[in-house]
Image (cartoon, rainbow, N blue to C red):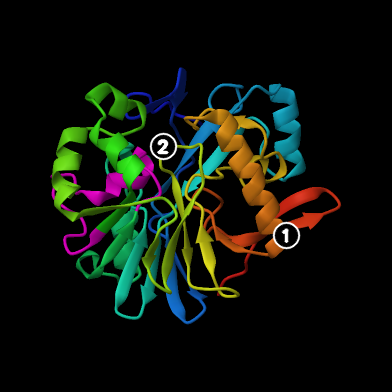
Amino acid sequence: MKISMLALASLVVGAVTLTVQAAPPSPGVQYQAFKIGSYSAIALKDGAIQEPNDAKSFVVGQPTAEVAATLKNGGAPGDHFDFSIQPLLVHAGAHVLLFDTGAGNYFGDIAGKLQGSMAAAGENPAGVTDIFISHAHGDHVGGLVTPAGTLAFPNATIHMSAPDWKWLNGMNAETAKNVGITQVTALVAAIRPKVVPFEPGAVLLPGIVEAVEIKGHTPGHSAYRIGSDPNSLLVIGDAMHSYVVSVREPSWKVAFDTDQQTGAASRAALVAQSAATGQRLYAEHFPFPGVGKIVKSKKGDTWVPETLH
């Protein structure tokens, strides 16, 4: 049963209103350890949301019947989309890296479980040295602060692209609410001393983390490549949301994207490149834990999740 969360987070991108809805209750905190070459990594569940298949809340410009058929052919329900929320933590030598921070208290009870998942995994927020933000939407920056407004990761440098940092700083209360952020002035004030903006595509920690610009979602949306080939992992942020539609029909436009045409082109290029190279991906909104590859098959490009132990 879907419960409207409009009072908690009504997202507006361009002229499209997106109502965040509660996903079915998820079991407590969740984490999954795995490896990125010699690095130890942990997928951390923060929550989950749903969007209806209604031609306006996620996929736009396509008949709902066609979207439903694609979803069903990919093994998903045809009437809605399920999106997990799962930041990633990585131990890389002396660095403890966190990629995005979940929704914090912005989306109510459907999210904000990152701290609990970290505790269950034996991780201390004070030990995080670097945070890498893919973009300034509430389900990615909300966990930067506690409900009291203090820094949730007090010792971490916060890396955010210069275009998205500028965009976040320029938001008024209404604009921020439209992208799922409440009390934006307090958020910016709290994190400002820790933010180190970077130019898109910058090498942030040499040999460890490189920013990868993927245009269209927000002014400075960034993916991150961790490690080096052939053991690298690409954290894709919101370049893709649905493990079925985003992979099988990447050129379909998405309401979440600030520039829908550019977002669709970037997504199609990412799918094609990932399928061609076998790049290992970390998809923050795909089914938990979100680690896998895109593989070409007779049915087209398909998401193949990795079996983790």
Amino acid bearing label 2: Pro
Task: Find residue 278 and report its image quarter.
Answer: bottom right
Q: Which label number is shown at residue 219?
A: 2
Range covered by the magenta-colored residues: 133-157
Q: Distance between the residues labelled 2 and 1?
A: 27 Å
Q: Which of 304 and 92 is in front in this view?
A: 92
- Image check: 160 left or right of 74? left
Q: Name the residue under label 1.
A: 276
Res. 202 in view: yes
Amino acid bearing label 1: Ala
Q: Position of residue 140 (x, y in %)?
A: 36, 46
Q: Where is residue 95 in the image (x, y as percent from the top left)?
A: 31, 74
First-in-chain label (2 vs 1): 2
Above or below for 42 versus 107: below
Q: Where is residue 120 in the image (x, y as percent from the top left)?
A: 33, 67
Residue beneath the point at 60% across and 75% down: 230
Helix, strand or loop for the magenta stretch, by majority: loop
Instruction: Assess disc 1: are there few (<14), some (14-19) or many (≥20) residues with their C-alpha within 10 Å of its C-alpha.
Output: few
* SS at mark 1 in the image: helix
- State yes or no: residue 115 in magenta: no
